[in-house]
Amino acid sequence: MDIAIQEIEEIAEPSATYRTTADSALLHAWSLFIALDDKSNHQKNSHRRVRFGVIIFVFLTSLLAVLTTSITADTPDLLKNLLTIALVALPITTAGLMSYGLQFTPTLAWILYRFSSESIRKEIYLYRMEAAQYQDLSLEDQQKALITAVSKACDVIKDLESLVPFLQKHRTNEYLVENVKNRTDKNPDPNASAPEIPRLHRILRGITRVPVIGFIISDFVAYLLGEDYKEDHITAYDLLEAELSENQLTGDDGFSPLTTDQYILWRALPQRNWYVTRFNRDYAKFRSSRIVILVLGGIGSILAAGGTTTQLYIVVSTALVVAFSTYVQFRMYGQTYTNYHRSAQDIDSAIANWLIIRKGSQQEAEQVSTLVSDIEAVFQQERNVWSKIAIQVQTAAEDALTKRVDELTRQSEQTEDEDAA
């Protein structure tokens, strides 16, 4: 009887090295991560679309201002009235859109949400690997430490002035577990069909991308230059990933304890490969976008030599340069590739050290903890640098765009007063 009771107690209270989908601390951490991750993605997309819309409106306003100067006595009254109304309405619309963006898609929100979500992800993997502050603790103390760390990761957004609600309604544990598995499993079900996007949503999403002509030009220039940021060749890391994958019957469920091989396969290598893809793509975009800006600026300079007959073309080319430069600044091309490159190098060094330990003596808990802590420290350092760059660049771009919108609004008010007089 005593033996039966003991067996039941052991099942009801898993050991400190056991993680399940019923782990309340992990469920709490993943729930907050998903909420912040989803809201960050939504806010980033909304932020970009609103700012790109403002950039297009500013360009159109500059173009209209030049067109109105070409009005003569022979211009039909209807065309005069339409140009005047448009020149007054566009700056007002632009200012309204910018005001909406500042209030409901603030710059700091998506950046800090991303920072917090990735900090939570770091704590989740340290917890599952029982590394750093989670080493040599009981299960209860580990769970308390995880909840404390998750709360601390959210400190950066608690005092955010333009807070955008991110908490979601409580879902069932089954829904949350499936959501986590879809995000962490690097080998999803190949037979699973992708969710169908409603036709109206596809149309609207397409419309929002149409104005970004510079993006298409930039990609085309990158293609002409042969800038290929996709790794089509087999690398040593591909072979390592294939070797580690051979012994894995299932993918990462987001909750179970991880071996060192699984951590490298499901956490370190995917992030390292993401860095490589991103810094190559960022550098290619930066180079091609600079070429586009130089070409547009050169066209404006050549047209300037043509005299007043090319005044319209000069203004158009200048407005295009300003619009595309602002777009490039918001996309942060050329701002992050050095940070990602440095992080990938540090991950390579950590993996190289791990390979020496893996082929040598038996891995000890202290060695595993050091490895995981070092890799997560690289990720954290990358986030710290990225967040500072993102805040500085995005804030500067937004200030410049806001200043330009204010200038156009003042010009519109002066035009309206002149017409009234």
Image (cartoon, rainbow, N blue to C red):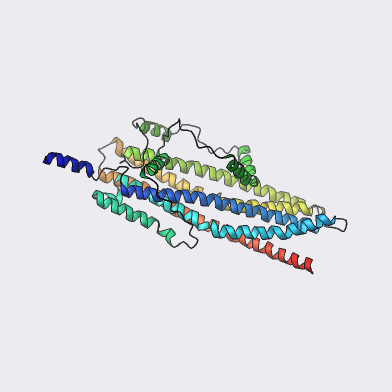
Tell me if 405 is positioned left or right of 379 in this view. Answer: right
| Nearer-the-camera pick, 42 or 132 | 42
Location of the C terminus by quadrant is bottom right
Residue 370 showing in the rendered view: no
In x, y percent, where is residue 24?
31, 48
Image label count: 0
In this view, which residue lies farthest toward the left? Answer: 1
Tell me if 361 is positioned left or right of 337 in this view. Answer: left
- What residue sits 54% from the left and 45% below the top? 282
- What residue sits 35% from the left and 50% below the top? 28
Location of residue 188 by image quarter: top left
Tell me if 5 is positioned left or right of 310 in this view. Answer: left
In x, y percent, where is residue 147?
33, 53
In x, y percent, where is residue 156?
42, 59
- What residue sits 85% from the left and 58% below the top? 72
Location of residue 223 by image quarter: top right
In x, y percent, where is residue 29?
36, 50
| Nearer-the-camera pick, 291 or 414 | 414
Q: Is residue 187 above or below residue 104?
A: above
In this view, which residue lies farthest toward the bottom? Answer: 421
| Nearer-the-camera pick, 407 or 201 | 201
Location of the N terminus by quadrant is top left
Residue 414 showing in the rendered view: yes
- What residue sits 39% from the left and 34% below the top? 241
